[in-house]
Amino acid sequence: MEILWVAIVAALVALVFAVVATQRILGEDQGDETMRSIADQIQIGAAAFLRREYTFIAIFVVVVAVVLLLFRDLDVLDKLDSGTGNFADAPRFAIAYIVGAIASATAGYIGMYIAVRANVRTTAKAREGLNPALRVAFSSGSVMGMTVVGISLGSLAVLYLIFQDVGPLTGFAFGASSIALFARVGGGIYTKAADVGADLVGKVEAGIPEDD
């Protein structure tokens, strides 16, 4: 049982590190007015994308959770019993699934939040040299990494403390991975569309050659 508290403490340390790193990044200079204006537009676009994506993801999560709850009266989950946990406990499995989905979505939101704010600060620091820019860029990446570690480790530890069973924790992995899949595919389409749009605007309005 002591190892669970170690995991919770480690998760809290990771989250505190992420908060401190975020505050340091947000305290950096954002550059001139033009840079800040472009950064604001990027942040608005990213926020609009996340709102729309998470709306559909929430519907998906609710539907899947209901389906998992319906398994309570079936024997489908009994066949998944590995001997280390009772996967047939559909309510706990569904709860773990929802927690995993929320954890994954939260980590994704935080990652997007810091990324679209660190980019302009990295650009501003690049005027001072390569190393200052890299420090800001690497710090923003560490925020996402520590957030994922802190949220996932803490959530799993708390769920085990509540359920006292590793079986339902599979639902957490299911929820987290399904949301990550949505974010990966949806985010890839969004970024590619933005890239193509930027190329077209650059060619038509500014006369910038391809990949220049």
Image: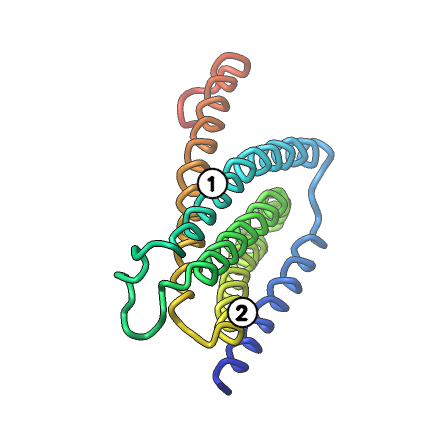
Looking at the image, which residue is at 60% across and 48% down? 118
Which secondary structure lies at badge 1?
helix
Left or right side of 175 for 78: left
- Amino acid residing under circle 1: Phe
Left or right side of 73 for 10: right
Residue 12 percent across, percent down from the top left: 60, 72
Circle 2 crowding by C-alpha within 10 Å: few under 14, some 14–19, many from 20:
many
Q: On residue 60, which mark appears?
A: 1
**Residue 186 or residue 173, whichever sits in front:** 173
Left or right side of 78 for 174: right
Q: Looking at the image, which residue sits at the far front? A: 73
**Residue 181 or residue 168, whichever sits in front:** 168
Residue 18 percent across, percent down from the top left: 60, 63
**In this figure, which colouring scheme has been used for the structure?**
rainbow
**Residue 121 or residue 74, whichever sits in front:** 74
Q: Looking at the image, which residue sits at the far bottom? A: 2
Looking at the image, which residue is at 50% across and 58% down? 95
Nearest to N terminus: mark 2 or mark 1: 1
Residue 190 percent across, percent down from the top left: 47, 31
**The C terminus lies in which quarter of the figure?**
top left
Q: Is residue 174 above or below residue 2?
A: above
- Amino acid residing under circle 2: Gly
Asked which quadrant contains residue 90, the reply is bottom left
Q: In this view, does 69 lie above or below 189?
A: below
Which secondary structure lies at badge 2?
helix
Q: Mark 2 points at which residue?
A: 154
Asked which quadrant contains residue 21, the reply is bottom right
Residue 195 percent across, percent down from the top left: 46, 28
Per the model, the C-alpha gap separating discs 2 and 1 is 24 Å
Q: Nearer the viewer, mark 2 or mark 1?
A: 1
Asked which quadrant contains residue 27, the reply is bottom right
Looking at the image, which residue is at 65% across and 58% down? 22
